[in-house]
Amino acid sequence: MSKMDIDEILRSLKPWGRYQILLLLVVCVYGTMVPALHIIAFIFIVDTPTHFCKPYEGFSKSEAIPISKEHSDTIVEYESCLIYEIDNGTLTNETIGCPNGNEYMLTVGESTVVNEFDLVCDKKLMANTVVSVYFCGVLVGSIVSGLTSDYFGRRNVFLAATFLIGITGIALTFTTSFYSFAAVWFFTAIIEQCINVPSFVLLMEMFPPEKRTAAGCLSNVSWGVAIAFLPLYAYLLRDWRHMQIAISAPCLTAVFLWWFVYESPRWMISKGRLTDANNVFRKIAKFNKLDESNVYIDAIPKDFNIKTNLEREESNESMSLQKRNDVTGSAKSDVAKERTYTMIDVFRRPRMLRNTLITYCIFMINSLVYYGMALNSSNLYGDKYLNMFLVCLVDLPGGIITVYLLPRYNRRLLLSVFLIAASLFSFISGFTPLTSSDGTNLFPIILTSACLGKCAIVAAFGTGWLYGNEIFPTELRNTGFGTCSFAARIGSIIAPFFLTLNSHYDGGVEILFGVLAAMACLAVYILPETRNRPLPETMEEGENLHAGKIKATNGEMYTQSKL
């Protein structure tokens, strides 16, 4: 039986049957919206409210606080952590820190970790650090999710992590110090990634190539829906503890999904569990109300997972084993079944290594720009909550764009277009002054370009998410995809510290984002095209995923036109 038959089985099971739609809904809600709410909630949880040194008694803010920036007669910014020194009841020209503590301007009565633990001025680095602590947890979770889901299965890790994040998310609200908060948040981040990565891989492995793109794009849209509603959560539930409970408690219902979500047959086959894979196919056929006589069930032979052409570096070893066992074919099957691949094997294959490193760079830059733009939204001039709402809202059209375009155009083309658009809009936002020479307020241009840039990077992120999943073979897909997410988290970890550029040059961080997005655009064209191609099953097929061809398990070469 050839490699293509697993896709034929999925087609015979009715690709958009009842079960596939149910799985898509489960992954959209629990596998995408839940992680999205948790990972983007940091914008509000660790938001820094406008604050000043508490003025001396008898003095107003305008008298005691020095002006930081004066954009025009009507647009003035005051220093956040400095106040004029007082001598014998008279203000001097010397500035000092805040002797009376800080005063927060809570525009909607919000409560965040920053004002609760007073993480401003000399403690400002702690606020940036706690965001990086979270993304360090996401980084660790990227590796843990890959290793555990390749070992225990996609479904088991996905559902267990969803239930656990409900527990840790609620536990987070009972923390009473900065350090206890950071510790629990770190473990919550690890669990969040154990939801996001396995659920998406599970979804991708349940669809044939021609339906996989649509399913992945719809999952990306659900991310945008969650992010669009997050500012509403934050506005209605102004205490960060209440908002955290609201996004965590529903996750406890994941325990009921255990009987409705099945394990990935591709993963089972890669582990040699052929009977279990056939049972899953049978359950899906029954759920979709299909006649089993018209479905390719029990069509997988015992040697389906065995490569008839092993990699060259293993051929001599397998031949010697065959001679020692004196049984042609059986020893080869034993070697293949016992062979366990790790990311180290990628470094032994030049094309897979090249594709992997380029994918890492693109993921890291996408993540840095995406989360940097989200964090920077609270620093833009004007109504902070309105700015944050608009910058979050554009995640939804960004996801919808991928739904429309990804099934129609090549991955490389779209990813490069999205990245160059993000670069151009970032440059516009960074180089545009707040006011023109004649005093005209140019902030609407800055905000519009910032939103369009965020929309473009969201579309790039969604395209890259699907792209990265299609590059790695089944034998290493979850681990490889998890390490891509690991690379992305390096970008999100350092993103908070990049925002300090704005204190030296207005728009500096946006200009940096533009440069990075342009660099990622150039790197895209090194990758192979994967649109409408079967997912590579073996390491050999992952190595041959280039130049428009892929070598199947039975040795036959398929070209792009044939696929």
Image (cartoon, rainbow, N blue to C red):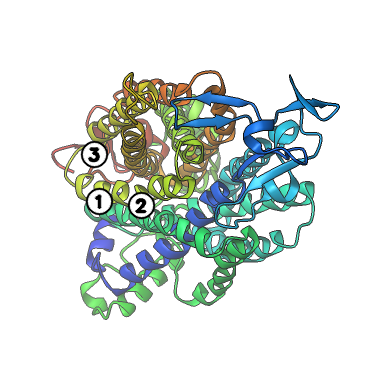
- Which mark is drawn over residue 220? 2
Q: Are marks 3 and 2 in contact (CB under 8 Å)?
A: no
Q: SS class of the residue under badge 1?
A: helix
Residue 553 in picture, x, y percent from top left: 32, 43
Q: Are marks 3 and 1 in contact (CB under 8 Å)?
A: no
- Closer to the chain start, of discs 3 and 1, is 1
Using residue 4 as the reference point, say whether residue 44 is left or right of it.
right
Tag 1: Cα neighbours inside 10 Å, few (<14), some, or many (≥20)?
many
**Residue identifier under label 1:** 403
The CA distance from mark 2 to mark 1 is 8 Å
| Precedes in sequence: disc 2 or disc 1 | 2
Q: Amino acid at mark 1?
A: Val
- Badge 2 marks a residue whose secondary structure is helix
Q: Which of these two is toward me, 320 or 427?
A: 427
The answer to whether the residues at label 2 and label 1 have Cβ atoms under 8 Å apart is: yes
- The quarter holding residue 100 reads top right
From mark 3 to mark 2, how far is it between C-alphas? Answer: 34 Å
At 72% from the left and 41% from the top, the residue drawn is 119
Q: Is residue 470 above or below residue 441?
A: below
What type is the residue that disc 2 sits on? Asn
In this rendered view, identify the residue nearer to me: 347 or 552. Answer: 347
- Identify the mark at residue 556; answer none if there is no mark: 3
Q: Nearer the viewer, residue 116 or 250?
A: 116
How far apart are the alpha carbons under marks 3 and 1?
33 Å
Q: Position of residue 59 (x, y in %)?
A: 71, 37
Residue type (three-letter) at the residue carrying disc 3: Glu
Q: Residue at x 68, y 36 (%)?
A: 129
Q: Nearer the viewer, mark 3 or mark 2?
A: 2
Q: Is residue 80 visible?
A: no
